[in-house]
Each structure stands twice: as structure tokens, then as C-alpha cells.
Amino acid sequence: NVVAGGAGSGVAELLNAEAVTMPMLHLGLPDSFQHHASREDLLAEAGIDQAGIRAAVLKRWPQLMAGKPPALNAAAG
């Protein structure tokens, strides 16, 4: 799924329409021509293979925990 206009965008629009505010991490294929490659190579190039998703979540995690109560920060540690 592409990021722009993909399934995640639809979910984000619905939550926004319902005034639900929460941090989101949008991951997906770029909205551009993809060169021919194996599925694994395409996912890795877009950062949506296992390693890329893990890296994106770990990079964002400190920001998400910064605004949480101390008990949640301790549990996440």
C-alpha cells in the first residue's frame, strides 16, 4: 500500500473526523515508480521489511513515551 491515499490515510481521516487524536507512524511504499526487483528487495528499499519497521518504531518510541505518565515509561523500559 502506498502512504498517500493508502489504507492508513483512510484510517487517519476517519479518526480525524471523529476528533480522535493520537500519534501515528505512516509506513508504506512511496508514491512513485518502483523498479523491478524481488518482493524482499522492494520492501527493504521502502523500509517496510521487518528490519525497517523495527527501526522506524524504535526511532519514534522515545517521542511517544515522552508524553506518557511515568508508570508507562517505566513499563516500557
Image (tube, helix red, strand yellow):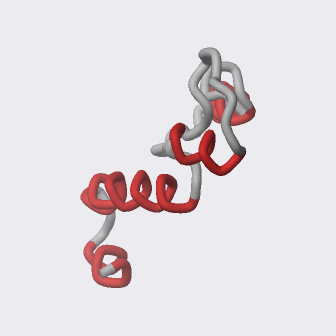
Seen as rendered, the residue at the extreme top is 32
Q: Residue furthest front?
A: 37
Drawn side of residue 73 relative to residue 45, left or right = left
Q: Quadrant of residue 8?
A: top right
Residue 72: % across, % down: 36, 75
Q: Residue at x 61, y 32 (%)?
A: 29
Question: Looking at the image, which is closer to me, 43 or 54?
Answer: 43
Locate residue 44, reporting x and y percent. Answer: 54, 47
Q: Quadrant of the N terminus?
A: top right
Q: Quadrant of residue 12?
A: top right
Compared with residue 77, is residue 5 higher up or lower down, i.e. above or below?
above
The quarter of the picture where the C terminus appears is bottom left
Residue nearer the viewer, 46 or 72 = 46
Judged left or right of residue 42, residue 69 is left
**On the picture, is 54 further left or further right than 42?**
left
Q: Nearer the viewer, residue 66 or 33?
A: 33
Query: Does residue 4 sit above or below 66 in this rendering?
Result: above
Question: x and y percent of residue 49 in the render?
Answer: 58, 54
Q: Is residue 19 above or below residue 75?
A: above
Image quadrant where residue 69 sits: bottom left
Residue at figure coordinates x 69%, y 29% from the top left: 36
Give the residue at x 42% y 52%. 56
- Label total for image: 0
**What residue do we see at 26% from left, 75% from top?**
70
Q: Position of residue 23 (x, y in %)?
A: 46, 44
